[in-house]
Image (cartoon, grey):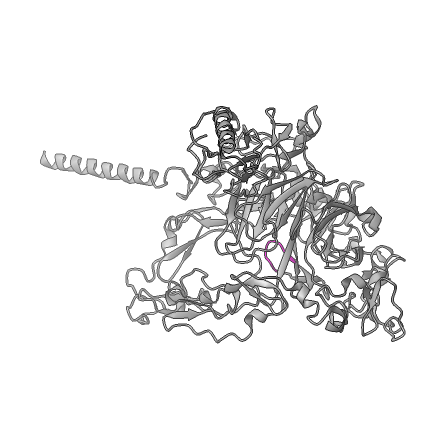
Amino acid sequence: MWTDIRKLLIFHLLALKLHSSKGAEAEECEDGQFQCNNKRCIPTIWRCDDDDDCSDNSDEENCARKTCAPAEFACANGQCVPGRWRCDGEPECPDGSDEADATCSKQTCPPEKFDCGGSTNKCVSVSWRCDGERDCENGSDEEDCAADAKSCPKSEFQCANRKCLAPVYVCDGDDDCDDGSDELKCSSRHSPTTTCGPHEFRCNTSECVPVMWSCDGDPDCPDGSDEWPERCGSEGSQSRRRMNCTVEEFRCANGECVRLAWKCDGDPDCKDKSDEADCPLLTCRPDEFQCGDGSCIHGTKQCNKVHDCPDQSDESGCVNATKCEGPLKFLCKNGECIDRAKVCDNVKDCKDRSDEPKKECGLNECSLNNGGCSHICLDRPIGYECHCPTGYQLLDKRTCGDIDECESPNACSQICINYKGDFKCECYQGYEMDPVTKTCKAEGKSPYLMFTNRHEIRRVDPVKKDYSQVLATQKNAVALDIDVANNRLFWCDRFHRNIYSALIPEASVPSQQVTLVDSGSLLSPEGLALDWVQHNLYWTDSGHKTVSVASAYDGLKRKVLVDTELSEPRAIALDPQFMYWSDWGTRAKIEKAGMNGVDRQVLVSDNIEWPNGITLDVANRRLVDLNGAHRRTHLSSSERLGHPYALAVFEDRIYWTDREREAVYSANRLTGRDVSTLAEHLNDPHDIVVFHPLRQPQGPDSCNLGSEANGGCEYLCLKAPQITEHSPKYTCACPTGQDLGPDMRGCVPGESVCVSGWLLVEAGGGRKGVMGSLAGSEHFLLGENLTVAVLGVVIPIVPIVATVVFGLLCTGVYLVWRNYRVNSTKSMNFDNPVYRKTTGEGEEDEIHIGRTDSGMSGQHGHHPPSEDV
């Protein structure tokens, strides 16, 4: 009996163990995973995706057959992909059926496309034909282009290298062809008998330059004779360029002013490099590391995986002690590295003997359940490793998951679509994928560049590098922008302190040049940007320390938008809602605000010294990032960058001017590589822009969507940032000295009052009064939570006769005035969208104007403003 009971007990124990082992096998996969028939675990989302992830196809069994949508292409294995991916040169179907010859060889190019022909059977935009770039893989789009690309128009000069130049650049003393051919056979022009025109100056070397260039502080003659003291005075023309540098600035030998902190910092900031002359050799303390540029950092910051040196030299040559170099090395537990072939060879090569573990040598872990790896298991002499196929990565050392290649900003030119095992690049409307470079290229006409070159504005083709002159005989052209739709040019001349406008074909005709803003409103204009949708022109002025706006086509309606906390405002750029500007003053920064001046915020203020040019990658919404995050250095090189000044971005290229090297360069926008020279031997180039319709995409004009023109505004109508769903589409603005009326559209005269002999000006465009200042604009609050505000003060002007004859009469007048003021003074404060009006009667003689938000308060009078007036 006991024997039967014992047998029965053993039977139950064996059954229980078998049941538990089966349960363990069944629970081998984690939540969110599917267990294949071969016991492999894969993510559940991979089930029934028409891809054999289990390697035994068990994840694709008993799956419902998919039906592809009309806009999709059905792969041979049943998978669906977008129809536009068919025959695009890249297989997206796992079986490659979307690129099969039987399907793609029958492709016919539409009329707006060029057939590359041959075995490639590709179609490209017909506008790319003979544009100087090979877009077909076989180069057929650039064949038989002699009449189009290899010969210059009759009105232009053809260089020996086939570059085309405007005749004005031939025999001008500059090598504009880059091979010297434009300066050959020019002896007659430079002979001693050369006669210059009545408005020209004859150099000592016989060249002729405009007389207005003489004694302007910039040598234009090859020998500099236009700036010699004999002509320009005992001090020479340099005195005209010398500015009164502040105590915080260093005066360069050429008269420029740079920050005092930049002297002897190892980096030449003066154009003549005089700030680095006669500097003592910099030595670092024993506990410091000396960077390649001579600066010092604490020794603990070397090899800490953080770039602390400006030239990143603190992280060069660092040894990573956590892994051995190369796949044929084995890392011992004590940190030693030995050859992998010496592992498990019965010889203890690691000092800690970690290369000869008895239990692991000779064991193939991959033979049991694929080592627990979801895809590839590689057995090693000691242990094993899980690997993934291309397009996947390890998630937990065992399971492979899809790599989201789109997380990298360099993955695609514009649109990145991630899918399992791979990714796909696409382009925005108006662009097309180049089959050769795999980048997005604009359809339609080829783009060209326009840049200022001190005395002129030039145009250059970025591919063919052909030159032409747009505007000449300028004194000091520093900034420009364009209206592509209307073919109009805007530029400013710092010498004359004017902003001009003209149609591009007529820009060289003086009678066609319109002065939009004259020297009465400008002191030192720096940057210029056009709002091509609302048709307003914005500019920075480092002299007035302001950011301003004016109506673009006549310049008659003007407004100062920002005039506080600015030191040296320089470049400015616009998108359809915001304006961005750089400030290279003592506290260098890049800022952002609505195009009506509200919602001002600092984007970048750390690790920045001299922000000169800024530009917007409008297609990809990047500030070359609109919110100041995700900063990335595209190019850092003392050899390639001298004094970069202005930037422009289009397609996959970034363009910039360099004042020190006197040239225009370009590089790949994503990598910073492929640097090329577009123009050199220039004369102090400043601003640069790209001319192409896609640079200024058209959108709705918020000020003219309704029945009322200009939004019903009496003066300026400015686009408002869409901060919330309740934000207004636009706001009205009035000129300095006027306020918005009760309807928030019309303008009413601003008023002033005389108190105790002091004139207190009411919010005059943010300008300071005698007794105090009112921060911000009189129409707009620059706070974070306010969209628009109006501050108006209605104060009667009481005439006081300045006749002191009788003391009693003076006292009587004063008492009458006081009694009247106490009973009539009112203060109004509007905060959109809730309007609040407060009126009060006070006992004091002083006038108080207060704002409820911190940091935006101002005062007129002798005492601080009250909390809320």
Residue 40, quarter of picture: top left
Q: Residue at x 52, y 34 (%)?
A: 806
Extreme residue in the front direction: 806
Is 332 displayed left or right of 506 in the figure? left
Is 848 displayed left or right of 746 in the figure? left
| Residue 24 seen | yes
Extreme residue in the left direction: 2
Main SS, magenta residues: loop
Tell me how many marks there are. 0
x and y percentages locating residue 838 in the rendered image: 47, 25
Foreground pick, 173 / 216? 216
x and y percentages locating residue 711 in the rendered image: 67, 28
Is residue 667 a member of the stretch shown in magenta?
A: yes
| Residue 411 seen | no
Which contiguous range is marked in magenta? 666-673
Is residue 37 placed above or below 816 in the rendered structure? Answer: below
Is 532 displayed left or right of 631 in the figure? right
Foreground pick, 62 / 780? 780
Quadrant where the N terminus lies?
Answer: top left
Is residue 832 a member of the stretch shown in magenta?
A: no
x and y percentages locating residue 764 in the rendered image: 58, 39
x and y percentages locating residue 260 in the rendered image: 52, 64
